[in-house]
Structure formats: structure tokens, C-alpha cells
Amino acid sequence: MKENKLFRNLLLIGIVIIALIFTNLFLDNYKVKIINLCAIYIILGLSMNLINGFTGLFSLGHAGFMAIGAYTVAILTMPVEMKEMNFYMKPMLSSLLNLNLPFILALLMGGLMAAIFGFLIGAPVLKLTDDYLAIATLGFSEIIRIVFINLQSITNGSLGLKGIPQMKNDFIAGVFNVQAKPNILWAWGAAILTIVFINLLMKGSYGKAFKAIREDEIAARSMGINLFKHKVLSFTIGSFLAGIGGGLLAVHLGTIDPASFKFALTFNILLIVVLGGMGNITGTVVSAIIITVSMEALRFLDGPMNFGFFTTSGLPGLRMVVFSLILMLVIIFKKDGFVKNALTKVRGKYAKN
């Protein structure tokens, strides 16, 4: 039975990868970028769900961990010439100027740096609970952003970094003799690995301990579970995945600056987690795709709109207002997550049939 399930899952992953390769080849650049962004938000949504949904910690520091991952990947992958062009106000540190790593190593380093900061921050603040923890992690995120603005010889300050090398599907495009486009296999490969990892983690003893802590800390402690160790572990793994997501986002955008990592970014990921359902992997994946595509589809709300009898001059930020309203409605009417409830109904319908 287990072998059949493993074979079915491997077959599904293989089909998804083949579908992604052909999608990458024949869709235009804009659609490829949206599909790429879906994978990045899946990673970020699962990383936050591990901390908030499965372990029951209320963390709002994701944007800070993403910034660490994004800047690490950018600094480690940019060629020397591009760094010199970016750092025209103040020269970059000589030790970083000539530092250059392959993308995969830089991405892992981005996740590792975020995990180290997650561990250092998590160890003292995880003694706090609920809203106190949320305020502390939100403060950390803002501190990181302000520090990055002032570390001009490392991060180029508020000017940010431009010309971050993008990963393209040159090899496959050459085989099929089509134009090379941004390679979505990096982001989707990382997303698939994250889904598999979180699934395996939650089925293991650590995952059960995380859930026990979420349900009742006193009962978990009486069962012999080390609360501090498991909380720090969950926070560190979540930070690592957030750093990976941030690194992929930096390559996806090609340019980053401290303003890219404001609280609104954490808010987007929190929206994915809430809509998908706390502690729900499938719901998070579906929610990440729906929200990413919807945010692009609703981009027209920020621009001028013609209603026939009058025309608006454009309301920047209206898109986020709409999503904020959606989040409020979901919290009021569907506390367990809109996508989670929908998936449960679909499963129930097929089970009856």
C-alpha cells in the first residue's frame, strides 16, 4: 500500500515537472513570471504555516528573513562589474566585491543566513507568546530593514541592488529551438521539495511534537516534549525556508531594495496562510496559487478605471485594500480557512460517491 502511494506521488511529481517544462517553453514571459511567483509564495506560505499554523507561534517577522535571503543571494551571484555599477555612491566592501558563487550555493547560503538569524532571534523571543511574540518578531523585521538601509557598503542602502542575474532555461530552450525565458524549474523545484519536506516533517515525531505544542503547551510539557527546543527548531526551519523564498524572489525580480521588505510582504503571506487554513499544507498551496494569480488579475484596480459615466485617475494601493477586506471577511466568517473548508467539502463529496 505504501509502495503504491509512493509510486503515485513520484508519478505525480514527474508529470508536474514535465508540464512545467512545456509551460516554461511555450507561455509568454509575463505568464511564466506569474507561475514562478506562485511557486515562491508556496514556499513562503508553507514556511509561515510551519511556524504559525503547525506550531501555534504567532510570528510576523517573515519579511526580515526574506530580506536576509534576498540580499545574500544577490550579493553572492552578482558579477563584479554589476556590483561596481550599483555601488557608485559608496564602494562595496572589498571582501564582498569579488565574492561570487553558483546560484544553488548562493540560494542555500541565503537560507542558511536566514536560519542563523532565526535561531539567534528565536532563542530569546520564543519565551513570549501570542501578541507579544508577534510584536517582537515584527520589530525584528523592521530592524533588519533599517539596518540594511544604513549598511551602504554592503547593501547599497536605500538605492538597493539592480541587475541581479536571472536564471534562464537556455539548455531546454536550445533543445526545442525557442527563445530562452526565466527558468521556473528552480522555484518550482524548491516548492516541490518544500511540500515533500513539510509533509515528511509533520508525519514524523517532530511534527507531532509541533502539533502537541500548538494544541496545549502544558499537556505537551507533561508528555516530556521540550517546548523551547521544538519552538526554536520550528522557527529556525521556517526562517530557512523564508530565506530561500526571499532569494528566489530577488532573482525573480532582478532588483531589490529595503522598501521591498516592508510589513505588507508579511501581510501577503499571512493572507495565504489564513485563507488556506492554519496547519493545512494542501490549502496553503492552493491558496498561494489563487492569491498570486488574483493579485495580478486585480492589478487594474491600481490604475485608471472607466465606468462609462466617469473615469477615475487611478488609486494606487486599492488592490491591497481589496485583499485586506477579503482577509477580514475570511476571519469573520471562515475562521478555519476558506480554501481548507472548500477542499474538505470536495473530499467529502468524493468520499460519499
Image: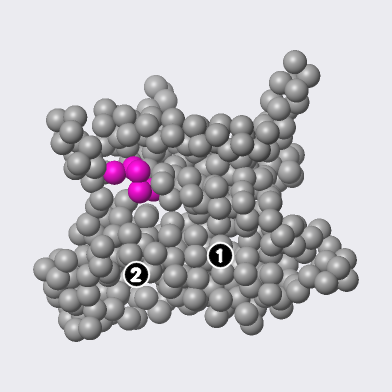
**Amino acid on which disc 1 is placed:** Ile
Give left or right: position of 265 versus 287: left
Q: Quadrant of the C terminus?
A: top right
Q: Identify which residue is drawn at 49% across, 61% down.
A: 242
**Visible residue check, residue 67:** no
In the picture of the structure, the residue carrying the numbered disc 1 is: 237
**In this picture, is 6 found above or below 72?**
above
**Visible residue check, residue 80:** yes
**Amino acid on which disc 2 is placed:** Thr
Q: Nearer the viewer, residue 127 or 139?
A: 127
- Residue 90, quarter of the rendered image: bottom left
Q: Identify which residue is drawn at 69% across, 62% down.
A: 206
Label 2 to label 1: alpha-carbon separation = 17 Å
In the picture of the structure, the residue carrying the numbered disc 2 is: 72
Start-end of magenta stretch: 183-187
Residue 40 image offset from top left, x and y in percent: 43, 49
Residue 157 painted magenta: no
